[in-house]
Image (spheres, rainbow, N blue to C red):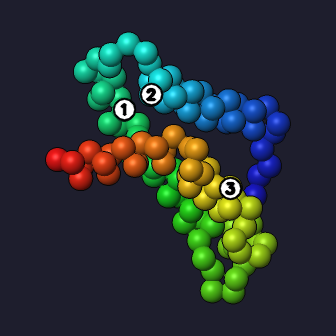
Amino acid sequence: MPTISEDARQLLRYNLYEHLDEAEFLATKTADWTDDDADTARDLIPDLINVIRGVLVEHSTPAASTCPACRVPWPCPTLSTVHRLIKDPDNKLVTIRARAVEQRLSA
């Protein structure tokens, strides 16, 4: 397998962070969203969820109790970190999810 130069690693990391920064900027815009902003969010949110699901699949429960991606005892640090970031009660994802459930129940 070919190795990746440090410059290539930094470019890849920068590109990923830039994409996440754009998503965060859109989500935290103080002005009202335009139709284009809403369309972008509708495209971006499922993409980000697919990324999280992809990471979870790579680090899924193995038959031998070892993470197939990390090759360490399961749950591996990657899965533990994703779980902690998503399920943290102070996390905005949890707040948004709870608000959506409340709205559905009151409708």
Residue 75, position as x, y percentages in the image: 69, 71
Left or right placement of residue 59 versus residue 107 in this view: right
In front here: 106 or 72? Answer: 106
**Image height check: is 66 above or below 54?**
below
Identify the residue at image location x=56%, y=62%. 56
Amino acid type shown at disc 1? Ala
Which quadrant of the figure contains the N terminus?
A: bottom right
Please rate how many residues cluster around mark 3, counting C-alpha atoms within 10 Å: few if below 14, some from 14 to 19, many from 20.
few
Identify the residue at image location x=68%, y=55%. 81
- Label annotation for residue 56: none
Q: Can the viewer see residue 8 in this picture?
A: no
Mark 1 vs mark 2: give the one in front: 2
Left or right placement of residue 90 versus residue 80 in this view: left
- Label annotation for residue 81: 3
What is the C-alpha distance between the residues marked 1 and 3? 25 Å
What is the C-alpha distance between the residues marked 2 and 3? 22 Å
Say whether disc 1 or disc 2 marks the residue closer to the N-terminus.
2
Q: Can the viewer see residue 17 in this picture?
A: yes
Amino acid type shown at disc 3? Thr
Secondary structure, mark 3, is: helix
Residue 34, position as x, y percentages in the image: 29, 17
Q: Which residue is mark 2?
A: 27
Mark 1 vs mark 3: give the one in front: 3
Say whether disc 1 or disc 3 marks the residue closer to the N-terminus.
1
Q: Are marks 1 and 2 in contact (CB under 8 Å)?
A: yes
Please rate how many residues cluster around mark 2, counting C-alpha atoms within 10 Å: few if below 14, some from 14 to 19, many from 20.
some
In the image as oriented, which residue stretches furthest toward the front?
106
Q: Which residue is mark 1?
A: 41
**Image height check: is 52 above or below 44?**
below
Quarter of the image for residue 6 reads top right
